[in-house]
Image: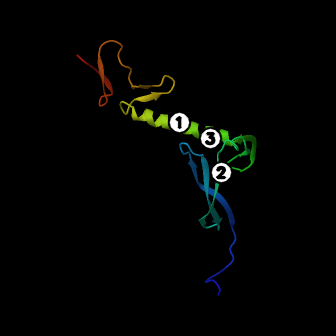
Amino acid sequence: MANYNQKEVSGNAWTRAFQITVDNPYNGTPSILFSEENILDLGDRLINGRSGMLEQQLTMENAFTQFPLLDPATNNETGALANYAQLQQMLHSIYMYLAKERDILKTQPFPSWTWNAQSEVWEPPVPMPETGEWAWDEGTQSWIEQL
């Protein structure tokens, strides 16, 4: 039986990873899963559909397996190499960086104060006077002397 309204089309098609999942179980083997989708560009519209998955366990045996780094804009090799151990190190570092940023934001004493990454302290928009006891007044953006 023929398909209804079947016709030839022209365009470009490719496969891409639309989701990347890192599994890092405690006392287990880490792995990375790439969920793929196919894209069809018909010029006036894009059609996408899920197509498959790639999974790689990150083990001591393959920790130093090298792969070429690619430029995301062109997909050309940059000339640099990386390995799975470096990938795990980068993912761990990104997590620790983001978790620290999140935790720092939780400690912000007032919305107007800014984080000084060099000294690792929250700083008010107006420095606190050096003598006396003071409390910050967010409404007036000033220090109020405590008598």
From the viewer's side, name the closer residue of 83 and 11.
83
Q: Earlier in the sequence, mark 2 or mark 1?
A: 2
- Based on the displayed image, in which of its 4 quarters is residue 111 positioned? top left
- The residue singled out by tag 3 in the image is 88
Identified by mark 1, the residue type is Met
The type of residue carrying mark 3 is Gln
Q: Quadrant of residue 140?
A: top left
Residue at 64% across / 41% down in the picture? Answer: 87
Marks 2 and 1: which is nearer the front? 2
CA–CA distance in space, label 2 to label 1: 23 Å
Using the image, tell me which numbered label, if any, was put on residue 56: 2
Residue 101 image point, x, y percent: 48, 35
- Position of 117 with respect to 113 (left or right) is right
Direction front: furthest residue = 27
Kind of element beneath mark 1: helix
Residue 68: x and y in percent read: 74, 45
The answer to whether the residues at label 3 and label 1 have Cβ atoms under 8 Å apart is: no
Outermost residue, right direction?
79
Say how the picture is coloured: rainbow
* Amino acid tagged 2: Gln
Q: Which mark identifies residue 96?
A: 1
Q: Is residue 69 above or below residue 122?
A: below
Above or below: residue 122 compared with residue 25: above
